[in-house]
Image: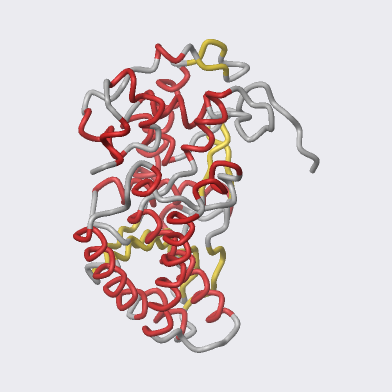
């Protein structure tokens, strides 16, 4: 389908959009509205800057991406009848991807500014001299733990033993909810021998309640797109760093709660629109800065808020 320019972004909803909206309304504005069309050659300065900054990553996010890419490869190999990847290969692939992001961040600043959608850039280098040694040590330790956790994954073991049929792996998809396009990208969906549908999410961070809410949303996706009864769905969180697994069998009542939560947040988000039909946002000043200012120094959009926050970016870069 040919590219069709839109004056305003298309209205949609996702769990990550909900998280951004709840964390900081200004970030929400920059990410989903101000950045729109910022990829165009003659884009206004705010749109170009917002689009560039939304592409920044950080070491923890980069690690999550590297682990998920490696997990996807492991699943694809198993689906072809190949043996489970050894922990050494898993770790090396993760480290290779991390080294690439690091190297681009050190020497590719100009390329990132010119092509932010193609060149990775770590927040730690964009705004400063790079991460502290303490952070690097923590990441290195977590890489090893996540590699061992993935190699010993319950999900991969079941697939390796032929006890599951892969339905989707890192597959970008959408479904409709209350007339809104909802984005869903489950790490893995497979059908077990017990005729249950397992929705798997590999996590590289700590256990949080909102993680279950995220995979429960994927339950709505499975119900809407695959026609699966709620009682046939099990969501599984594999915390690779800790080597632990959390499972939850879903039911119709749980999915109803997720629907209600999504509907409520959609209504709240639309309250920040000047024109709901066009999905045109209200002016920037209608989107307040986060009350918790401690998160601002870690924010991708710090550059755009620095003057309002009275933050000296030059001082930040020397930390």
Q: Is residue 172 left or right of residue 263?
A: right
Image quadrant containing the N terminus: top right
Q: How many marks on residues? A: 0
Is 17 located above or below residue 244 in the figure? above
* Residue 167 quadrant: bottom right
Q: What residue is at 49 percent from the left and 63 percent from the top?
A: 189
Q: Where in the figure is residue 207, as x and y percent of width and height?
A: 23, 56
**Is residue 319 shown left or right of residue 202?**
left
- Left or right: where does residue 275 sit relative to residue 53? right
Residue 223 at x, y percent in the picture: 51, 50
Residue plotted at (44% across, 44% down)? 56
> Residue placed farthest to the right in the image?
2
Q: Residue at x 38, y 24 (%)?
A: 26
Along the viewing direction, whichever of 286 and 303 lies nearer the viewer: 303
Q: Is residue 150 left or right of residue 49?
A: left
- The scheme the figure's colours follow is secondary structure
* Residue 176 vs residue 41, the one in the foreground: 41
**Which is more toward the observer, 96 or 190?**
96
In this view of the protein, which residue sits in the foreground, 36 or 208? 36
Q: Quadrant of residue 275?
A: top right
Which quadrant is home to the C terminus? top left
Residue that appears at 49% across and 84% down: 162
Q: Is residue 19 above or below residue 184?
A: above
Residue 314 placed where, x, y %?
31, 34
């Amino acid at each position: 389908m040919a590219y069709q320019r839109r004056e305003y972004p298309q209205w949609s909803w996702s769990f990550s959009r909900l998280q951004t909206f709840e964390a900081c309304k200004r970030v929400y504005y920059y990410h989903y509205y101000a950045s729109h069309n910022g990829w165009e050659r003659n884009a206004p300065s705010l749109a170009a800057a917002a689009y560039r900054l939304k592409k920044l990553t950080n070491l923890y996010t980069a690690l999550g991406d590297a682990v998920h890419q490696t997990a996807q490869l492991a699943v694809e190999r198993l689906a072809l009848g190949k043996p489970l990847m050894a922990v050494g290969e898993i770790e090396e692939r993760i480290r290779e991807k991390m080294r690439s992001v690091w190297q681009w961040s050190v020497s590719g600043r100009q390329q990132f500014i010119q092509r932010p959608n193609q060149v990775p850039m770590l927040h730690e280098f964009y705004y400063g001299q790079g991460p502290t040694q303490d952070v690097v040590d923590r990441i290195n330790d977590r890489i090893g733990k996540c590699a061992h956790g993935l190699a010993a994954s319950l999900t991969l073991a079941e697939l390796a033993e032929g006890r599951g049929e892969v339905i989707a792996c890192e597959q970008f998809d959408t479904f409709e909810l209350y007339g809104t396009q909802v984005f869903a990208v489950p790490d893995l969906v497979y059908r077990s021998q017990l005729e249950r549908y397992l929705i798997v999410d590999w996590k590289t961070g700590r256990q949080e309640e909102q993680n279950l809410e995220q995979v429960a949303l994927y339950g709505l996706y499975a119900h809407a797109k695959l026609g699966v009864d709620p009682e046939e769905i099990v969501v599984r969180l594999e915390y690779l760093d800790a080597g632990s697994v959390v499972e939850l069998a879903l039911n119709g009542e749980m999915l109803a709660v997720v629907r209600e939560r999504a509907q409520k947040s959609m209504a709240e988000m639309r309250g920040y629109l000047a024109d709901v039909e066009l999905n045109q946002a209200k002016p920037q000043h209608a989107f307040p800065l986060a009350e918790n200012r401690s998160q601002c120094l870690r924010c991708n959009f710090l550059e755009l808020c620095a003057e309002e926050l009275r933050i000296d970016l030059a001082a930040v870069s020397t930390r």
